[in-house]
């Protein structure tokens, strides 16, 4: 008789796992992006965080029903197979392996390097770099070096990689909570040479009625809220999971939204509006906590990004292997091979590293410098995440169609909320990354430009390649 996983987690531990899975480095990165997209308008930025969090909770509840229904199933690909079928699951896995996870991982490599160089240049102003830590070539080279080091750690010592992951989980909460509390108090009691902090800039935006700033900001929050789907994979290990898992997911989601909101408000209170828009959150830490402690917190941010990078890379280097064990994908037998010394799928690891490196080059060239790719430049930190929301919708629809014996709440209401939330994120991305840039370029006489269209072309080409290398699953 097969022995199942032990029911070992209570409600409190489940809540902690949900919060620990989602809260990460994305908020450090996207706080600046939201300030930029809203032009420093605080109410609009706060509303964007709330809407993004509500979408997360809607989808969490929908997948929670799936987790209870398919209690022995773990992971997004398996949920796709349970609701639609093996081919859809393969395309979900191929998308995650080639686009979704490596695109996020590449951004985290850059973030880790960026905040580390912010720390170094603040401690030692004589340390010269070519430009600023956001766009310099040194940041790009350091990101590549960090990526290779983390790859080596994961392929040669899984125990060391695990310790790095645990340490970073605790470290990342320190700057978030300190800035949330101290930064908010500081922002309410200070100004900068007569200029209010953005915490008080309640009408900084243009007020033209254009929805693209709000939609763009909501799309930006998706990067910070991403990771919640992993929380559903622990359902078979939670005591009384049918009761405790929904509670843990909802309470955990509310806690995450609260942490992000107060951190965003705290950062907004730490520096003038334009400084935050131009330079990011690092100046706020130094202003609020002083040069020494503020720089230490910036180092903590770098370590937090490193931990998230480590966790994502774990998935990247196993991506091709995960497809091959289903007897699907390119070079199945080659990707299945396990190295006897390390116990790792070495061929899959190498392919994963190459894919991440390619996305890192694209992210740097398309988003951080004068675009290397011209009009074929899109935000690879946001659009792949929005795509996954689009891929959720058929799963929710099929679940509603198949599970006829469930009560209306679980069969229609919760999956319906997931559909609404996912559809809103897709619409917001199409508007802010497609329609708005097209209209702006047309009015400026710059010719046709539509970043979301160019992304969809790349997506279609990659998925066509996935279809070409797909092999039928053996029965």
Image (tube, rainbow, N blue to C red):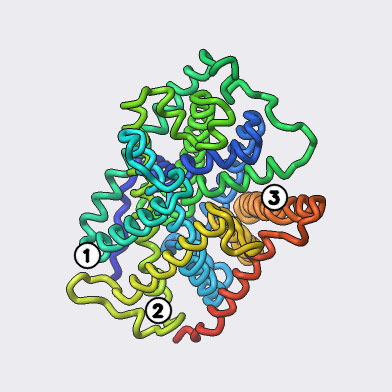
Q: Earlier in the sequence, mark 2 or mark 3?
A: 2
Number of marks in picture:
3
For residue 432, the mark is 3
Q: Is residue 326 above or below residue 108?
A: below
Front residue of this view, candidates 470 and 126: 126
Which of the two discs, 2 and 3, sits closer to the camera? 3
Q: Work out how far the residue at label 1 is from the one at label 3, CA to CA, in angstroms.
A: 43 Å
* Secondary structure found at label 3: helix
Q: Is residue 13 visible?
A: yes
Q: Earlier in the sequence, mark 1 or mark 3?
A: 1
Residue shown at 59% from the left, 36% from the top: 35
Residue shown at 60% from the left, 52% from the top: 410
Residue shown at 22% from the left, 71% from the top: 343
Q: Residue furthest left?
A: 341
Q: Position of residue 161 (x, y in %)?
A: 26, 55
**Quadrant where the N terminus lies?**
bottom left
Q: Is residue 332 above or below residue 220?
A: below
Residue under numbered circle 1: 156
Q: Work out how far the residue at label 2 is from the one at label 3, CA to CA, in angstroms.
A: 37 Å
* Secondary structure found at label 1: helix
Residue under numbered circle 2: 324
Q: Earlier in the sequence, mark 2 or mark 1?
A: 1
Q: Position of residue 43 (x, y in %)?
A: 65, 29
Q: Is residue 139 left or right of residue 363?
A: left
Q: Position of residue 327 (x, y in %)?
A: 42, 82
**Quadrant where the C terminus lies?**
bottom left
Q: Is residue 200 above or below residue 395?
A: above
Q: Estimate how packed mark 3 is, as few (under 14), some (14 to 19) or many (20 or more) residues with alpha carbons within 10 Å.
A: many
- Do the residues bearing badges 2 and 1 touch, measured as CB atoms within 8 Å? no
* Secondary structure found at label 2: helix
- Do the residues bearing badges 1 and 3 touch, measured as CB atoms within 8 Å? no
Q: Estimate how packed mark 1 is, as few (under 14), some (14 to 19) or many (20 or more) residues with alpha carbons within 10 Å.
A: some
């Amino acid at each position: 008789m097969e022995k199942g996983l032990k029911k070992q987690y209570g409600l409190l531990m489940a809540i902690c796992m949900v919060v620990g899975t989602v809260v990460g480095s994305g908020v450090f990165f996207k706080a600046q992006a939201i300030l930029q997209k809203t032009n420093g308008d605080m109410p609009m930025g706060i509303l964007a965080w709330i809407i993004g969090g509500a979408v997360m909770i809607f989808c969490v509840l929908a997948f929670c029903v799936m987790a209870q229904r398919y209690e022995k199933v773990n992971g997004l690909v398996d949920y796709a197979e349970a609701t639609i079928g093996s081919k859809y699951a393969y395309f979900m896995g191929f998308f995650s392996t080639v686009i979704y996870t490596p695109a996020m991982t590449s951004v985290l490599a850059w973030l880790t390097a960026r905040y580390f160089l912010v720390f170094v240049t603040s401690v030692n102003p004589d340390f010269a770099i070519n430009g600023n830590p956001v766009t310099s070539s040194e940041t790009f080279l350091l990101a590549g070096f960090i990526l290779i080091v983390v790859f080596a750690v994961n392929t040669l010592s899984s125990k060391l990689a695990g310790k790095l992951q645990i340490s970073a989980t605790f470290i990342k909460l320190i700057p978030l909570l300190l800035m949330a509390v101290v930064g908010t108090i500081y922002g309410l009691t200070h100004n900068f040479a007569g200029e209010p902090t953005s915490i008080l800039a309640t009408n900084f935006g243009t007020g033209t009625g254009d929805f693209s700033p709000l939609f763009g900001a909501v799309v930006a929050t998706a990067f910070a809220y991403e990771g919640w789907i992993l929380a559903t994979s622990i359902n078979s290990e939670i005591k009384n999971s049918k009761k405790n898992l929904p509670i843990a997911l909802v309470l955990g989601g509310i806690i995450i939204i609260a942490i992000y909101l107060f951190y965003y408000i705290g950062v907004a209170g730490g520096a003038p509006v334009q400084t935050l828009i131009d330079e990011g959150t690092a100046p706020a830490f130094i202003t609020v906590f002083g040069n020494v402690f503020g720089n230490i917190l910036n180092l903590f941010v770098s370590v937090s990004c490193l931990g998230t990078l480590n966790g994502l890379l774990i998935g990247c280097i196993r991506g091709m292997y995960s497809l091959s064990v289903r007897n699907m994908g390119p070079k199945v037998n080659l990707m299945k091979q396990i190295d006897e010394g390390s116990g790792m799928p070495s061929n899959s690891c190498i392919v994963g590293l190459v894919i991440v490196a390619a996305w890192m080059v694209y992210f740097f060239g398309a988003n951080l410098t004068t675009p290397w790719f011209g009009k074929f430049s899109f935000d690879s930190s946001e659009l792949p995440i929005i795509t996954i929301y689009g891929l959720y919708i058929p799963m929710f629809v099929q679940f509603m169609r198949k599970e006829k014996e469930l009560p209306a709440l679980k069969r229609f209401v919760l999956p319906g909320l997931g559909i609404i939330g996912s559809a809103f994120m897709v619409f917001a991305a199409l508007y802010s990354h497609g329609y708005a840039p097209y209209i702006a370029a047309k009015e400026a006489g710059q010719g046709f430009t539509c970043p979301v269209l160019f992304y969809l072309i790349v997506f279609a080409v990659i998925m066509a390649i996935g279809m070409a290398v797909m092999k039928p699953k053996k029965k």
